[in-house]
Image (cartoon, helix red, strand yellow):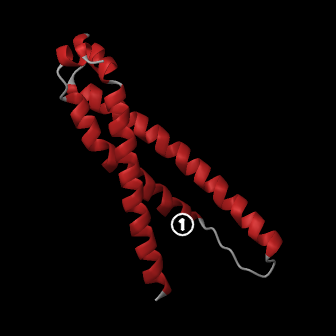
Amino acid sequence: MFSTFIDVVIAIAMIIGFIVIFQAMYTAVLERTREIGILKSLGAGKLYIVNVVLRETLLIAFGGIILGIIASYAAKAGLRTKFQTLPILITGGWLARAAVIAIIGSLLGAFYPAIKAAQKDPIDALAYE
């Protein structure tokens, strides 16, 4: 029963992560409308714009993964000092699973804003402000 609870918590965390990444990347695309217009006017194709947004998302995701792992080990150390008999197990399998979930969620969350950025008209984007 406990594993079902953990699966539900993971699913909820994934949905929340998807929404947060979606909102952050959508806002970033809106704030960079002028930059996207400049790139498109210089000849950048739709695939290039999508690639730029998704690469930025992956960079943020990898930074979050590293900070999450550090926070997990710091919480483990803090709990170990308070509760010496509490067994806390952080395995490589769980770290890999969390990393894969984070990467997939971030890419899914950034895909729509990347497509929207690629579809912007360069003239409208340059006139935006």
Corner quadrant of residue 125: top left
Corner quadrant of residue 102: bottom left
Residue bearing mark 1: 94
Q: How many marks?
A: 1
Whether 37 is drawn above or below 59: the answer is above
In the image shown, does 33 or 129 lie closer to the viewer?
129
Question: Please, what secondary structure does the residue beneath circle 1 have?
Answer: helix
Residue at the spot 28% in from the left edge and 27% down from the top edge: 49
Whether 129 is drawn above or below 81: the answer is above
Residue at the spot 71% in from the left edge and 79% down from the top edge: 87
Residue at the spot 31% in from the left edge and 30% down from the top edge: 30
Corner quadrant of residue 89: bottom right
Whether 44 is drawn above or below 91: the answer is above
The x, y position of residue 75, in whole percent, is 70, 63
Query: In the displayed structure, does residue 84 sit left or right of residue 46?
Result: right
Q: Is any part of residue 58 visible from this angle?
A: yes
In the rendered image, the residue lying farthest to the front is 129
Amino acid bearing label 1:
Trp
Query: In the displayed structure, does residue 33 sit left or right of residue 70?
Result: left
Whether 103 is drawn above or below 1: the answer is above
The x, y position of residue 12, in whole percent, is 40, 67
The x, y position of residue 47, in whole percent, is 23, 29
What quarter of the picture does the C terminus occupy?
top left
In the image shown, does 120 or 27 lie closer to the viewer?
27
Residue at the spot 31% in from the left edge and 50% down from the top edge: 108
| Other-residue count near label 1 (Cα within 10 Å), few / some / many at <14 / 14–19 / ≥20 | few
In the rendered image, the residue lying farthest to the bottom is 1
Q: Is any part of residue 105 visible from this angle?
A: no
